[in-house]
Image (cartoon, rainbow, N blue to C red):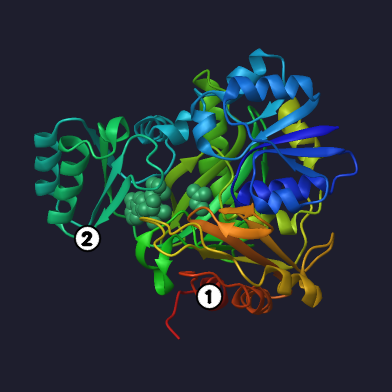
Amino acid sequence: MNILVIGSGGREHAFAWKIAQSPRVTRVFVAPGNAGTAWETGVINIVLTQIDRLIEFAQRENIAMTLVGPEAPLAAGIVDAFQKAGLRIYGPTQAAAQLESSKDFAKRFMQRHGIPTADAQTFTELAAARAYIEKHGAPVVVKADGLAAGKGVVVAQSEAEALAAVETMLKDNALGKAGSRVLIEEFLEGEEVSFIVMADGEHVLPLATSQDHKRLYDHDEGPNTGGMGAYSPAPIITPQLHAYVMRKIITPTIQGMAEDGIRFSGFLYAGLMIDKNNQPKTLEFNCRMGDPETQPIMMRLKTDFVDLLEHGINGTLDQIESEWDRRYALGVVLAAGGYPQKPHTGVRILGLNQVASQGINVNEDCALKIFHAGTTEENDEIIVSGGRVLCVTALGDSIKIAQKAAYGAAETICFEGRQMRRDIGNRGVSGANKKP
Ligand code: AMP
Ligand code: GLY
């Protein structure tokens, strides 16, 4: 069968790579993909992004199923449109994707269904928002309601910072419609984890646990990014905590959506804050897989991914189990200079072939894999074309071994302005993000 993957990041490269390994698959198309997906055996990039053109393509090429990577097409209703055209696609409908596309929707949903989350209030008027901040003080978190490409959340350490944030969103309209409604949320302390499951409207199949590293610099300093590295499994999620999260957060979410008449089918990613008493609260929902979490998760997945997707689409996730490599997988993101504000693109990437010729690159049971994100090929050279450029991902018997392998390879890849955190996975090693 032929499969279509929508997106162009490291997540989509990992999807395509994994799907291409399935004995059931003839070809994987990625729209639009990147230089990494173009290189992959059995994978073909197609230069299409518009939903109606993608539908035409899927019909013409006899696509058996489509998998959507990023949130924007989901929020735009790609699943509804494909389903209407009689095509099989895995992901939430536009209505269900509101769990991610509207933080106000998600918050009201969680409050209504008793799902643990930070207290928050929603504002559209600047004066009321200001008064609330002045009354409650800092630290406090200001969140734009809509999708804002990672720029919608301000964790304000001072009252002045919080006031400035609501002003840019509500008065200056800096985020447009996404910021015309803001949530002011209680600041939570603790450790963040990514809890990702597959859902089919009724049943839930949890994926391996993982932890992302959102800040740009080591020791969780600097601006928030899309994610500078991730590893799986996350030791902080003990079996007890896992069961608790399933019982108190994930199951009530899938059941609650069904009760509200909006069945949720697709990947559900709960961003959790675990406090010092091991109590989780939901910071956010994403209605898709995480990037870069997908890269280490796909490295560990032993079950045929196509079988999982098929059960997801058919509503039979209760009839399949997932099997995982018992090793740790750890991915280090190499980001462009200037990322996240203004990535410097257009520079050449060197050293990719070197990694390959050392024999540590790709094969089916590889210990190391370089997933591409913001890359394109021009005149036989690989060029930086986006903020997050590569994710060097390795498997190892311990987090330390995986770290050593991933960093060993990452070090040999260079491009002008390259940014890379040096402490991906340290939390899992030490139980805390200790400075060396
Ligand atoms: P979000 O998009 O809602 O996940 O927010 C982006 C990042 O901001 C999260 O990954 C957290 O690091 C941080 N954050 C969000 N909400 C809170 C909160 N209530 N307390 C502390 N940090 C938060
Ligand atoms: N890694 C964070 C995200 O995918 O939202």
Residue for point 55% across, 59% down? 389
47 over 329 or under it: above or below? above
User: How far apart are labels 1 and 2 at the CA level?
Assistant: 25 Å
Indicate the quadrant where residue 109 lies. top left
Circle 2 residue: 157
Image coordinates of residue 106 in percent, x first then y, are 41, 34
Quarter assignment of residue 351: bottom right
How packed is label 1: few (under 14 Cα within 10 Å), some, or many (20 or more)? many
Task: Report the amino acid beneath label 2.
Answer: Gln
SS state under label 2: loop
* Residue highlighted by disc 1: 426
Is the C terminus in the top left, top right, bottom left or bottom right quadrant? bottom left
Left or right for 258, reference 108: right
Q: Would you say 306 lies left or right of 121 here? A: right
In the figure, 164 relative to 418: above or below? above
Residue 284: quadrant of the picture: top left
